[in-house]
Image (cartoon, rainbow, N blue to C red):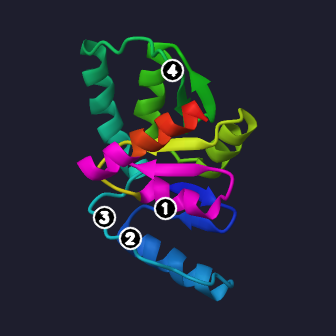
Amino acid sequence: MASINSHDQIVISGDKSAVYEASVNCKKLGAKYVLNINTNIPAHCALLKPISEKLKKIFKIITINSPVVPILNNVDVKSENNSENIKNALIRQVYSTVRWKEIIDLIKSKKIFTMLEIGPNTIITNLNKKNKNIIAYSTNNLKNFLISFKKINQGKNE
């Protein structure tokens, strides 16, 4: 599995024919929806293990400073403050299952209810729309970025 997004949404990744066969079997076993994700790589699966080895070599020459804010590691589902642990988790994330549902459960247990999605897409923001306890903002363009930070600053003043 590439990602466990929620109790009713799982992403499968791998060889195209194997993913197709798994999709057919999921449908036969009662899956309500089977959607193809338009992607060029089999993200978060064993096929990318060779890429992780290249990433490991790159991380040997890159310095990652210890973060000011803990980083949530979605491979082990825990907070990381140590730069070596962060590097190790990033390397394993390339070929490991993203445990998003567990990450959300961890976030809620820490009483965190506002999230910013930093990046070009709105995938995480859309995933969080189902969760009424979490407010998620996408910063995928300048307009959304400014709106997001304005809303977060308003929340601090309330």
Whether residues under marks 2 and 3 lie with C-beta atoms below 8 angstroms apart, the answer is yes
Q: Along the polypeptide, which appears first: circle 3 or circle 4?
A: 3
Tell me if residue 145 comes above or below residue 112 in the rendering: below
Q: CA distance from mark 2 to mark 3?
A: 6 Å
Mark 2, residues whose alpha carbon is within 10 Å: few (<14), some, or many (≥20)?
few
What residue is shown with label 4? 69
What residue is shown with label 2? 37
Mark 1, residues whose alpha carbon is within 10 Å: few (<14), some, or many (≥20)?
some
Q: CA distance from mark 3 to mark 4?
A: 31 Å
Q: Amino acid at mark 2?
A: Ile
What's the mark number on residue 36? none
Q: Along the polypeptide, which appears first: circle 1 or circle 2?
A: 2
Which stretch is magenta? 123-147
- Seen at 52% across and 80% down, the residue is 34
What residue is shown with label 3? 39
Q: Tell me if I can see residue 17 in this picture.
A: yes
Whether residues under marks 1 and 3 lie with C-beta atoms below 8 angstroms apart, the answer is no
Q: Secondary structure at mark 3?
A: loop
What's the mark number on residue 126? 1
Q: Nearer the viewer, mark 1 or mark 2?
A: 1
Q: Secondary structure at mark 2?
A: loop
Q: CA distance from mark 2 to mark 4?
A: 32 Å
- Seen at 53% across and 47% down, the residue is 98
